[in-house]
Image (spheres, grey):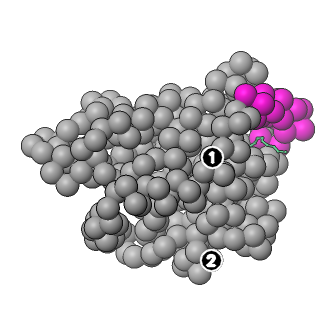
Amino acid sequence: QVCTQVPYRCYSTPGVGQVQVDMNSETGVATVRLNRPPVNSLNLDVLTELGIALEKLDADRTCRAMVLASAVPGIFSAGLDILEMYQSTPERCVAFWRALQDAWLGLYGSRLVTMAAIEGHSPAGGCLLAMSCDYRVMADGKFQIGLNETRLGIVAPFWFEDVMLNTIGHRETEKALQLGAMYSAQQALSIGLVDKVVPLAEVMPTVQGELKNWLQIPDAARVITKTSMRKQVLDRLRSQKEKDAQFFADFIGRDSVQRSLGAYIASLQKRKS
Ligand SMILES: CCCCC/C=C\CCC/C=C/CC(=O)SCCNC(=O)CCNC(=O)[C@H](O)C(C)(C)COP(=O)(O)OP(=O)(O)OC[C@H]1O[C@@H](n2cnc3c(N)ncnc32)[C@H](O)[C@@H]1OP(=O)(O)O
């Protein structure tokens, strides 16, 4: 049970919030859990909640680190909610994209040590969230991670691509993005997409152990280094947020893209029958 005792502080109502934040003020480590069953798909509400949670944690001077995880067993995040992109309106698409941009700018640009505890599948937007953290621990077994956008007939935006480039390098990114490749945890480890692979039950303890190393480093020096490494990629989006949001809405509204998304949704439903 979370948030029941001192020193934990909750930023969301347990069982209600789709983004649950437990702040341990003794250790300075916050745990942020996505909580939108069945698959933590990221809709406008979740992205808005996530963006706000990240902003609050960044402003909380007692907070030094954040673990991004899931409250839904078997899933880290299924990525963007496809229903936000299918048969939507241009206005809603723009609002949705702005919320994604803000949540991502908050995560990738966070002053905190950020670690992803990947205890389930992590396609597309889920992979983006994980890659945007400083360190990734993934559960071994059947789960998969990757940017699979081309398989849906859509294209990973330039800033998804930038983050992947910074994580696994040019050659692997080129293959991964064109193929929309999904990787097992072991494959992800072999290309540097995740940093450690452990049995499911050991993901959280491993993250906690790794955090101890990172928290030994003085914050100011670490933050200056992180900022210097990430600034170029962050500024590239910051300088063209509105253009990017408009481009997304135009692209997603194309008939051919809508047909591809419709077929993909049908294929997801067919898998179950
Ligand atoms: C030229 C430059 C252009 C630039 C820009 C333009 C824009 C485009 C870029 C947009 C970027 C998009 C990034 C994304 O994140 S797209 C989302 C991609 N996500 C996926 O492909 C994941 C699909 N889901 C799965 O593969 C599986 O669901 C799973 C995650 C492996 C989990 O499997 P399982 O546990 O078996 O669960 P189910 O498959 O039964 O799913 C349960 C339930 O949830 C629905 N669902 C699954 N994923 C999503 C989703 N992402 N969004 C909405 N809904 C989802 C699924 O259909 C089931 O629904 P029902 O119970 O109603 O059938």
In magenta segment, residue 164: no
- The numbered dot on residue 142 is none
What residue sits 73% from the left and 28% below the top?
242
Decide: is 62 above or below 120.
above
The residue identified by callout 2 is 191
What residue sits 66% from the left and 44% below the top?
235
Q: Quadrant of residue 205?
A: bottom left
Q: Are marks 2 and 1 in contact (CB under 8 Å)?
A: no
Viewed as shown, does residue 270 lie left or right of 150?
Answer: left
- The one nearer the camera, 36 or 32, is 32
Decide: is 13 above or below 272.
above
Please, what is the dominant secondary structure of the magenta stretch? helix
Please state which amino acid type lies under the numbered disc 1.
Answer: Leu
Viewed as shown, does residue 99 lie left or right of 136?
Answer: right
- The numbered dot on residue 234 is 1
Q: Position of residue 154 (x, y in %)?
A: 79, 46
